[in-house]
Amino acid sequence: DASGGVTNNHAQVSTDDFVGDYFVVGDLTKPDVTVTIVAATLDDSSPTSAVTFEFSEDVEDFDAADVVVVGGTLSDFTVVDGNSVTATYTADDGLEGTGTVSVLARSYYDLIGNNGKGSSDSVEIDRLNPTVEITFLDSVLSPTNRSSDVTFVFSEDVTGFEFSEVSVTGGALTGFQMVTATTYRATFTADVDLETNGELTIATGTYMDAAGNIGDAAS
């Protein structure tokens, strides 16, 4: 018979106590964690989500520095109890893609020193504002050619865009129609006896995409 111990920087196994020809082995089970981003999707109308970190047992040495965040930022890091932590994830503005929150393996330990497993969760993000490009088919108008077709081409399907929301300088806009979900068309007719630049302007917030992101201005 012999006595002794198997250790790392945290004591994990004790062979000091024998029962007959057998010895008692300590807890070697690694703790694990479930990361949950509560919201299914994030956009401009709802850019934040609660995040929970639920551990399989009480742990130590876990803090915000052990969390890798992609596509956003983590704030309000709060230890609820020995095996529960909460935080708030805020998606980056202008991002369309996937955000993730990950806990690194071996970044925390249970109370007897077993190092922890890693885990992550993800959320779909659409905080990319839609845009519109306004194009005059004729770049120069004259007394003999006072009209030009105009197209309004959006970067994605939008809602809320109305003819009345186009500001017109130096002429009038008629024949407004929707060609597709992303393309509109109209006719610009310059004012008589006018020598200046005609201009069409769409203000910020006059249209939005399906996720509720507010459209950018254009002219």
Image (tube, rainbow, N blue to C red):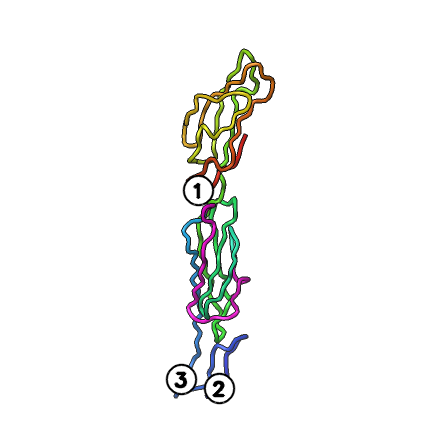
Observer-nearest of 19 and 151 = 151
Observer-nearest of 130 and 146 = 146
Q: For residue 211, what is the image quadrant?
A: top left
Q: Position of residue 65 (x, y in %)?
A: 55, 62
Q: Which residue is mark 2?
A: 3
Q: For the point 47% across and 81% down, which residue is it?
A: 14
Per the image, label 3 sits on a secondary structure element best described as: strand
Q: Is residue 193 above or below residue 212?
A: above
Q: Position of residue 147 (x, y in %)?
A: 51, 17
Reply yes or no: does residue 145 show up in magenta. no
Q: What amino acid does circle 3 point to?
A: Tyr
Q: Give the residues drawn in magenta, as a range.
A: 43-68
Is residue 157 among what the camera can see?
no
**Marks 3/1: CA–CA distance:** 66 Å
Q: For the point 50% across and 71% down, which residue is it?
A: 60
Q: Which residue is mark 3?
A: 22
Q: What amino acid does circle 1 point to?
A: Gly
Q: Is residue 117 above or below residue 187?
A: below
Reply yes or no: does residue 51 show up in magenta. yes
Q: Is residue 78 above or below residue 153?
A: below
Q: Earlier in the sequence, mark 2 or mark 1?
A: 2
* Camera-side mark, 3 or 1: 1
Q: For the point 60% across and 20% down, which residue is it?
A: 196
Disc 2 + disc 1, Cβ < 8 Å: no
Q: Which mark is residue 212?
A: 1
Q: Position of residue 98 (x, y in %)?
A: 47, 49
Per the image, label 2 sits on a secondary structure element best described as: loop
**Marks 3/2: CA–CA distance:** 12 Å
Q: What amino acid does circle 2 point to?
A: Ser
Per the image, label 1 sits on a secondary structure element best described as: loop
